[in-house]
């Protein structure tokens, strides 16, 4: 029995609509739960104070230590991953295009992308033990940098691959070296895509708990040194949800709401910057 083209198109249209509605519905339920439980507990004092005595019993204090700690951890890790990742992406596209080595590197990066974050945390913990360093801000940055690196490199690699080959050939024909072509042509042309990859990695880093559980530790104080423990929002949510006090559990949802808002703001900034910078790209 042959299926009519119109019936087949209608079936896949309904399937696509149903899948989209299902995903949006799950996202809506998650966001509604976080807002419903967290918004009543969110106040100015919670955003501007560190935990005080009895905070985990439902008394005064806030999550400023976790907010600042998360920004330090994700910001430092993103910077470290960017410094290492951009040269890798350029090397794959300009110096080793379509070679077995490049394909092997991409395969390794894809495998690393799929490795659970707890593995990165355990690996970082082993490195800290070997170096004789305790759980600290530096340890968390290193662990998150390993976590973000494959995400960032693959994103930048795909962005740079979209540059027309004629543009690179024109650069070489004008006497530019590969180094000049890389940073004056490739990076400039693909800057919106590179920025998207960086912010995508940052969002993954700031929302991860397992990678920093063993490497960054946790403290109720603001970060003061690279070699001291630091708090983070995902771990703040985890620890507060494990308490038997409903007021503290509501604060966990408030911390989750703050984390969601940070990621939302980063996404909006990314889209706005990408839109502005895309207008400067040679098509």
Image: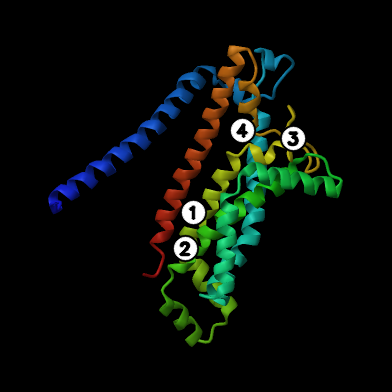
The residue under label 2 is 159
Tag 2 near tag 1, CB within 8 Å: yes
How far separated are the C-alphas under marks 3 and 1?
Answer: 29 Å
How far separated are the C-alphas under marks 2 and 4?
Answer: 30 Å
Q: Secondary structure at mark 2?
A: helix
- Please indicate whether residue 262 sits to the left or right of residue 48 in the image: left
Quarter of image, res 27 = top left
Of callouts 1 and 4, which one flags the residue occurring earlier in the amino acid sequence? 1
With respect to residue 30, does 59 lie above or below? above
Task: Tell me the residue at 63%/46% (across/down).
Answer: 75
Q: Is residue 183 visible?
A: no
Residue found farthest to the right: 132
Of callouts 3 and 2, which one flags the residue occurring earlier in the amino acid sequence? 2
Quarter of image, res 252 = top right
Of callouts 2 and 1, which one flags the residue occurring earlier in the amino acid sequence? 2
Quarter of image, res 237 = top right
How far separated are the C-alphas under marks 3 and 2?
Answer: 35 Å
């Amino acid at each position: 029995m042959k299926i009519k083209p119109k019936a087949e198109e209608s079936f896949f249209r309904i399937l696509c609509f149903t899948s989209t509605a299902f995903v949006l519905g799950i996202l809506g339920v998650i966001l509604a739960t976080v807002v419903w439980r967290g918004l009543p507990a969110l106040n100015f004092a919670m955003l501007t104070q560190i935990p005080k005595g009895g905070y985990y019993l439902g008394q005064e204090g806030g999550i400023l230590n976790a907010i600042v700690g998360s920004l330090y951890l994700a910001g430092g890790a993103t910077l470290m991953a960017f410094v290492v990742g951009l040269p890798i992406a350029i090397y794959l596209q300009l110096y080793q295009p379509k070679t077995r080595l490049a394909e092997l590197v991409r395969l390794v990066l894809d495998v690393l992308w799929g490795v659970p974050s707890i593995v990165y945390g355990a690996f970082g913990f082993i490195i800290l033990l070997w170096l004789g360093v305790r759980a600290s801000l530096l340890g968390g940055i290193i662990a998150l940098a390993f976590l973000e690196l494959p995400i960032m490199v693959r994103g930048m690699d795909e962005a740079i691959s979209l540059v027309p080959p004629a543009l690179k050939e024109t650069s070489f024909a004008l006497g530019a070296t590969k180094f000049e072509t890389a940073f004056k042509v490739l990076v400039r042309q693909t800057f919106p895509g590179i920025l998207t990859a960086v912010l995508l990695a940052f969002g993954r880093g700031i929302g991860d708990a397992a990678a920093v559980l063993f490497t960054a530790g946790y403290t109720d104080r603001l970060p003061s040194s690279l070699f001291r423990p630091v708090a983070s929002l995902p771990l703040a949510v985890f620890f507060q949800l494990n308490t038997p006090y409903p007021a503290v559990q509501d604060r966990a949802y408030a911390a989750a709401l703050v984390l969601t808002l940070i990621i939302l703001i980063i996404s909006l900034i990314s889209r706005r910057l990408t839109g502005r910078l895309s207008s400067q790209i040679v098509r």
